[in-house]
Image: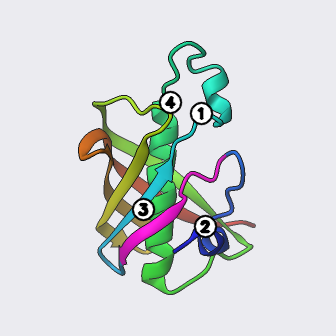
Amino acid sequence: MDVNEIRNFLPHRYPFGLVDRVVELVEGESILAYKNVTINEPFFNGHFPDQPIMPGVLIIEALAQATGLLGFKTMHAEPQNDTLYLLAAVNKARFKHQVVPGDQLMLHASIKKHKGMIWIFDTKATVDGKVAASAELTCAAKRED
């Protein structure tokens, strides 16, 4: 999936579109995607000006966006206007390696459990084969009233 197809499934736009391409997707199982990290990212102005490091919460957000793509493709569905898709929980989060401008952040996610509108994923983000972050993410869908 290229960025144009990704935009059909995710509502995120600049500066919060954090998935640039999907390399591999096995419906019902897993996804491999990436985010190219550049010095032009707006968060680097303040995190940190003299030693730019991608904030851990944005690495988790990138992983969550990848899980959304996996979920929609698994369901053979597109987002509905009357439904809000949310990151409901972040468990077992670990940050092991800093992500800096010039890195290609690889986003790995696999479905651990799915019941109704609740999905649980095992995720990890890597750079050059080294784990930068990992977490168990719970995502949910909520119909708006």
Whole-number angstrom distance, CA of label 4 to CA of label 1: 13 Å
Dot 4, crowdedness within 10 Å: few (<14), some or many (≥20)? some
Q: Is residue 27 above or below residue 95?
A: below
Q: Which mark is residue 122?
A: none
The answer for how far apart the CA atoms under marks 2 and 3 are is 11 Å
Distance Cα–Cα, label 2 vs label 1: 19 Å
- Near-viewer residue (127 or 141): 127
Q: Nearer the viewer, mark 1 or mark 3?
A: 1
Q: Give yes or no for residue 24 being in the magenta stretch.
A: yes
Residue on which disc 3 sits: 33
List the residue tagged with mark 4: 55
Q: Residue at x 52, y 42 (%)?
A: 37
Q: Residue at 51% across / 76% down in the picture?
A: 72
- Badge 2 vs badge 1, beta-carbon distance below 8 Å: no
Neighbour class for label 3 at 10 Å: few (<14), some, many (≥20)? many
Amino acid type assigned to the residue bearing label 3 in the image = Ala
Most distant residue in the top direction: 50
Residue that badge 2 annotates:
3
Find the magenta span and give its range: 16-25
In the rendered structure, which disc, 4 or 1, sits on the residue that comes first in sequence?
1
Are the residues at dot 1 and dot 3 in contact (C-beta closer than 8 Å)?
no
Question: In the displayed structure, does residue 112 sit left or right of residue 100?
Answer: left
Left or right? Give the position of 49 relative to 54.
Answer: right
Q: CA distance from mark 1 to mark 3?
A: 20 Å
Image depth: mark 4 or mark 1 in front: 1
